[in-house]
Amino acid sequence: GPEYVRAIAPYQAGKPISEVAREFGLDEASIVKLASNENPYGVPESAKTAMAAAAADLGRYPDANGFELKAALSERYDVPADWITLGNGSNDILEIAAHAFVEKGQAIVYSQYSFAVYALATQGLGARAIVVPAKDYGHDLDAMAAAIDADTRLVFIANPNNPTGTFIGAAEIEAFLKKVPANVVVVLDEAYNEYLSPENQYESAAWVKQYPNLLVSRTFSKAYGLAGLRVGFAIAQPALTDLMNRIRQPFNVNSLAQAAAIAALNDKDFLEQGARNNAAGYQQFVEAFQQMGLEYVPSFGNFVLVKVGKDLAAGARVNLALLKQGVIVRPVGNYGLPEWLRISIGLPQENAILISALQKALASDR
Ligand code: PMP
């Protein structure tokens, strides 16, 4: 294989519950998984009902163009349906975008401590990564604009960012969009957008009308609770969407996922309940971390990055101590944050179990 493929470090996903149960001799039902920024409520009932109906037709291929889901998204975001690209999760969108707009030898700009798939998509193309140092664990947009060179064709921005939870306000993003050359596509990855409080919300779908080089990426994996179904989408002008459509797999979003996504999109109660739970869980974590004297990065997503020690093995050590107690979180050494752990916000009881397990883990780590 190509040298640039052999150089890739594979994506490290959260450990599955079954694996941890086996490895540590635990009962699966007793395990708390706060490792993958999943929705603690799971799949909305409305989506389960929609999937049951769609299951009758699984002998047929899915709608290759996702007509109904695109129609629903078109209405929700007030953009024409042909401005929408569906993805097998938003990871698929990120990768399709990289393949559609960048070739080997060209460059992609992204921030230090931003989502791991940006590096993977870049490396998988044999493209050059321009990794811009973070500012306060978040994106330094001025430095990112300055880093765009003649070879650059794409910029990835995560807002809120994973794994740090940082957020960039609308004014700052627009100022950035105004500076970016027209031949550089800006992928604004909004996987955690639905967790923003109303005062932080902004109309990125409307920006797409103004900026022909902007692509907004969203997912059904987080606030909508459909991570296992793999469905995400992009909003961009037809010139970009048309190229994405040539590159994507014809049936990249399966029938159950399409049906479930339409139902979830219309399930306002589910979204509101999730947002309330997330805000309360964030307070629960932050208060506990403060009491424990732990540094954390203020988060706008459904997870918190917390510093669990001073040495470069601290994250791995505390992670292991948590696993032994049946709590799965995410070590972030692969992001260059080996003293930290990323912890997803769960249900109140799950959060309480994490807090007491973390207290025990840290007490024995002294
Ligand atoms: N973007 C960001 C910033 C993420 O954190 C994630 C999930 N880890 C994704 C995209 C991809 O999520 P999915 O493929 O499930 O839509």
Image (cartoon, rainbow, N blue to C red):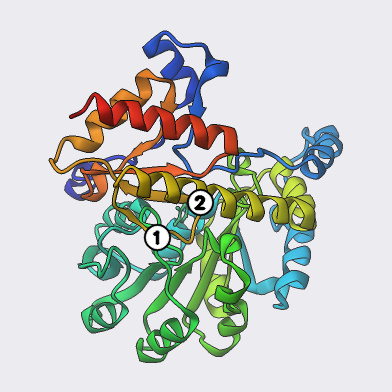
What residue sits right under mark 1 in the picture? Answer: 298
Q: Is residue 266 left or right of residue 121?
A: right
Quadrant of the rendering where the N terminus is positioned: top left
Classify residue 145 as left or right of residue 117: left
Residue at 56%, 84% in the rendered image: 207
Q: Residue drawn 20% across and 36% down? A: 314
**Mark 1 residue type:** Pro
Q: Give the structural element (helix, strand or loop) at label 1.
A: loop
Which of the numbered marks, if any, corresponds to residue 12?
none
**Disc 1: CA contacts within 10 A as few (<14), some (14-19) or many (>=20):** some
| Depth order, front residue of 336/105 | 336
**Percent position of residue 255, x then y:** 73, 43
Relative depth, front residue between 201 and 242: 201
Q: Is residue 155 left or right of residue 61?
A: left
Write the residue at 23% across / 42% down: 333
x%, y% of residue 105? 22, 66
In which image quadrant can residue 106 be found? bottom left
Image vertical order of residue 177 relative to residue 62, above or below? below
Q: CA distance from mark 1 to mark 2?
A: 9 Å
Residue corresponding to mark 2: 282
Pinpoint residue 233: horizontal percent, then vertical percent. 60, 60
**Mark 2 close to ligand 1, CB under 8 Å:** no
Q: Position of residue 215 (x, y in %)?
A: 51, 73
